[in-house]
Image (spheres, grey):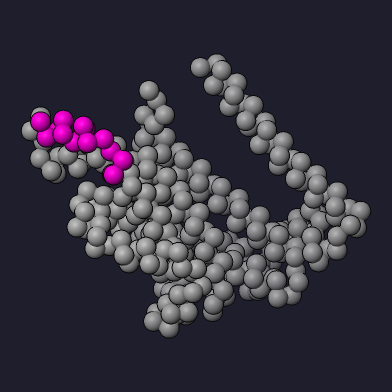
Amino acid sequence: MEIEKTTGKTEKFISLGVVIAIFLIWIGITSNGMIAETLVPSPTSVWSSFLDILHHGYKGATLWQHLGASMGRLIKAYVLAIITAVPLGLLSGYHSKIRAFLEPVIEFYRPLPPLAYYTLLVLWMGIGDASKIMLLFLAGFAPIYIACASGVNKIKKDYILGAKTLGANSRQIFFYVIFPAVLPDVFTGLRTSLGVEYTTLVAAEMVAAASGIGWMVLDASNYLRSDIMFFGIILMGITGILLDQILRWIEKKIVHWKGKN
């Protein structure tokens, strides 16, 4: 136990050291004029842009309105992906006929770049948030579905046969054997899906958006405001890490047996 704690502290120090090293390199290459300010702004410029947007907003909206708009689209699409992909993925892993029905569609659109079909979504659903949420939903659905289906397929048949021997029916096997066993894979899919949706968020805010962190970064690029672009990217990275940490915390509470022998 003491060894694990020591290892954990060492890993945290390494991670902190990497962050500090990147920050020092950033200061070094911007302080001596090696790179133009329009390409890589200095940390002080990014900090000044943060304070300016925090107090005065950006293009008619406050920082919290931009962040809220992006998080609203992301969370709506993410929740929709969870409540559809988890049950369908579990059922697909449990019933081969359901898997045969769903997988051709999912395997067809999954490798497609989001921008390839986003224009179609805009034509069908308009330029409002509906098309953006649908784009994020489609991007996040496949990772959850695949993780759930593959998790069911990995379950040892001995567990299922043992439950049947004890008199369990199909419903009891599903809820008391399969679902608990597949939970670690479900959370892996949830974390992967969140990352995929977040990377798609900028694409979702490229068309006819007037708010959102992704839109703010894209709009700033039109005016070569690299300081605002850096600030937006850093903000997206921090919020992404926080959301992932929340999922990790929930996973530890629910799947408390994971990694224990």
Say whether residue 161 is magenta.
yes
Query: Above or below — where is 216 with respect to 161?
Result: below
Residue at x-position 38% and y-position 67%: 108
Instruction: Report the number of numbered marks.
Output: 0
Image side of residue 15 versus residue 168, left or right: right
**How far across and down, in percent of the image, does residue 11 sit?**
62, 30
Image side of residue 48 versus residue 35, left or right: left
Residues rendered magenta in the picture: 152-165
Residue at x-position 74% and y-position 75%: 223
Corner quadrant of residue 187: top left
| Residue that protrudes farthest toward the left in the picture | 167
**How far across and down, in percent of the image, does residue 128 sit?**
46, 77
Say whether residue 220 is magenta.
no
Which one is in front, 107 or 208?
107
Which one is in front, 19 or 167?
167
Residue 226 seen in the current view: yes
Query: Above or below — where is 124 with respect to 19?
Result: below
**How far across and down, in percent of the image, does residue 249 sit?**
45, 38
Residue at x-position 29% and y-position 53%: 89
Image side of residue 28 versus residue 235, left or right: right
Query: Above or below — where is 48 with respect to 253?
Result: below
| Residue that protrudes farthest toward the right in the picture | 32
**How far across and down, in percent of the image, does residue 99 sit?**
25, 57
Residue at x-position 26% and y-position 35%: 156
Which one is in front, 87 or 161?
161
Residue 68 seen in the current view: no
Query: Above or below — where is 183 with respect to 108?
Result: above
